[in-house]
Image (spheres, rainbow, N blue to C red):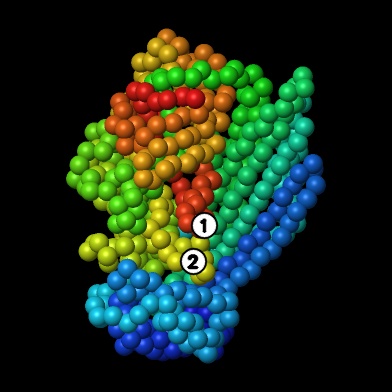
């Protein structure tokens, strides 16, 4: 794999590994703490079907490199789309000019070669099946969906394939490192109409694999893409009969899988080390302190097979790993990239991620989830006299400094006297992440990761992530 990556960035641009290491040695000679070079090649193909026709399709390809130099808490960074030795040296000088030379104290040099472990294939999803077969897939989903319910007035389908290669050289390593990352995503939106009332429902997913993933059968024996279409139809039709959500403070049961987005937003971001170092996170100075219910163990794990958020190595060359953030309610660790780990006298957890060569790496999540407990969904619902069961979310946001969060339920039901009564809409959940985590009173045994739809935004950068959780009960949460 590394030879393949070296070929596209070095051989095809008349470069040699020695050229990269000479540049890295120059960074050390200039007495900077650390420096790295990040080469990236990426191609994206997309299709949009609407009103039974392919309305849009496109292909995008990009390549380039970025050079970063670091001294203490100062960073010099420049990038270019033109890969050749002359331009590498020019961009290097531009990075030098951004910060002054200071006392030299470099990162620890890693001389031994790090074993490479792969958690997904290296196949190009843009070439995995014929172009016309991709078009056929979209029309097949469209026709299948329209047959399911006469109230369907439109089907909108987005299919995206990405293929990325990157190569990294850094002053703390004696070896070049690289990876190949495939990524596919399918989104299905169904619009229904009845008695002049319109509703829509969306569902989908993705994986670090090829287009064939959508043609495979899931654990229920159904073709994955057609099963997702039925889920989208269910959500759309549900909206036609849903009643307005009650407001107030109630106990809430959150379903397994995608509702873990609450965990991602309300807790995960606050545990990223840049916010901790800057003391802008509500979890600053709370290491080894209780920040959640003793039923809660939270893990970030970039090594899940084929998962949307998985990475073999991060965008700084650190191997992906499993990091326990919260153990039985006690805060144990943060998510580190090299830069923040260096400033905080810690070690990278393999969470240095970047959208492209044109951005600096930041500490970011991969696959973040709450581990299983021992309760059942039935037990949780039966324990509630009046509350809400929310099995799906549209998304949400959080204020890192205060921990305040807001989430919008796309599928929710009213619970009365231990039973689910009817579907509701318009439910908006809000609260403070650190307080809400302490109010988790029951955790299910049905841990499930989301279907592969997550995209996380931070400082203008969008990266693929995955979230998960078992069904959980929160004793009280504000519903607006």
Q: Position of residue 235 (x, y in %)?
A: 61, 29
Instruction: Determine which of the numbered discs, if any, sits on residue 113 in the image.
Output: none
Q: Which residue is mark 2?
A: 359
What is the quadrant of residue 201 in the picture? top right
Q: Position of residue 96 (x, y in %)?
A: 41, 82
Above-or-below relation of 418 to 343: above
Q: Please indicate, yes or no, whether residue 376 appears anywhere in the rendered image.
A: no
Which residue lies most toward the left here?
Answer: 288
Assign a secondary structure to mark 2: loop
Q: Please indicate, yes or no, whether residue 298 appears anywhere in the rendered image.
A: yes
Identify which residue is drawn at 52% across, 32% down.
408
Q: Position of residue 237 (x, y in %)?
A: 66, 25
Q: Residues within 10 Å of mark 2 (few under 14, many from 20)?
A: some
Give left or right: position of 353 versus 104: right
Give left or right: position of 383 versus 238: left
Earlier-in-chain disc, 1 versus 2: 2
Q: Which residue is mark 1?
A: 460
What is the quadrant of residue 67 in the picture? bottom left
Assign a secondary structure to mark 1: loop
Identify which residue is drawn at 71% across, 42% down.
156
Above-or-below relation of 182 to 223: below
Identify which residue is drawn at 33% across, 48% down.
281
Q: Position of residue 214 (x, y in %)?
A: 60, 47
Identify which residue is drawn at 36% across, 19% down.
379
390 or 244, which is in the foreground? 244
């Amino acid at each position: 794999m590394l030879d393949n990556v070296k070929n596209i960035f070095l051989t095809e641009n008349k470069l040699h590994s020695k050229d990269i290491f000479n540049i890295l040695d120059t960074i050390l000679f200039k007495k900077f703490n650390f420096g790295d070079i990040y080469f990236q090649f990426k191609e994206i193909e997309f299709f949009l079907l609407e009103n039974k026709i392919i309305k849009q399709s496109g292909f995008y390809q990009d390549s380039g490199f970025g050079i970063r130099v670091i001294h203490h808490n100062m960073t010099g960074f420049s990038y270019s789309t033109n890969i050749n030795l002359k331009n590498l040296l020019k961009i290097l000088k531009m990075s030098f000019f951004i910060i002054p030379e200071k006392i030299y104290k470099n990162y620890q040099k890693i001389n031994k070669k790090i074993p490479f472990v792969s958690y997904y294939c290296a196949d190009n999803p843009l070439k995995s099946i014929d172009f016309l077969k991709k078009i056929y897939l979209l029309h097949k989903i469209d026709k299948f969906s329209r047959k399911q319910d006469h109230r369907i007035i439109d089907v909108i389908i987005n299919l995206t394939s990405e293929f990325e290669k990157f190569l990294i050289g850094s002053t703390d390593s004696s070896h070049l490192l690289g990876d190949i990352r495939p990524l596919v995503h399918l989104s299905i939106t169904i619009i229904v109409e009845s008695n002049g009332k319109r509703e829509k429902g969306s569902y989908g997913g993705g994986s670090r694999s090829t287009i064939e993933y959508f043609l495979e059968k899931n654990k229920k024996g159904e073709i994955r893409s057609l099963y997702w279409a039925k889920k989208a139809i269910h959500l759309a039709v549900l909206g036609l009969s849903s009643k307005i959500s009650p407001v107030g403070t109630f106990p809430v049961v959150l379903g397994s899988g995608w509702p873990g987005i609450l965990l991602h937003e309300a807790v995960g971001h606050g545990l990223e080390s840049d916010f901790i170092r800057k003391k802008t996170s509500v979890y600053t100075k709370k290491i080894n302190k209780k920040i959640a219910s003793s039923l809660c163990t939270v893990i970030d794990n970039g090594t899940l097979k084929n998962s949307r958020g998985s990475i073999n190595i991060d965008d700084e060359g650190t191997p992906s790993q499993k990091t326990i953030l919260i153990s039985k309610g006690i805060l144990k660790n943060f998510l580190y990239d090299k830069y923040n780990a260096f400033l905080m006298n810690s070690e990278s957890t393999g969470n240095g991620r970047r959208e492209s060569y044109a951005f600096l790496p930041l500490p970011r999540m991969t696959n973040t989830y709450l581990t299983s407990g021992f309760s059942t969904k039935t037990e949780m619902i039966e324990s509630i006299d009046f509350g809400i069961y929310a099995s799906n979310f549209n998304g949400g946001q959080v204020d890192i400094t205060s921990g305040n969060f807001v989430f919008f339920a796309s599928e929710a039901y009213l619970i009365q006297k231990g039973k689910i009564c009817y579907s509701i809409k318009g439910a908006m959940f809000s609260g403070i992440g650190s307080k809400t985590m302490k109010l988790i009173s029951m955790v299910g045994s049905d841990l499930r990761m989301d279907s592969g739809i997550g995209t996380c935004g931070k400082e203008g950068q969008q990266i693929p992530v995955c979230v998960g959780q078992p069904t959980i009960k929160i004793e009280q949460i504000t519903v607006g």
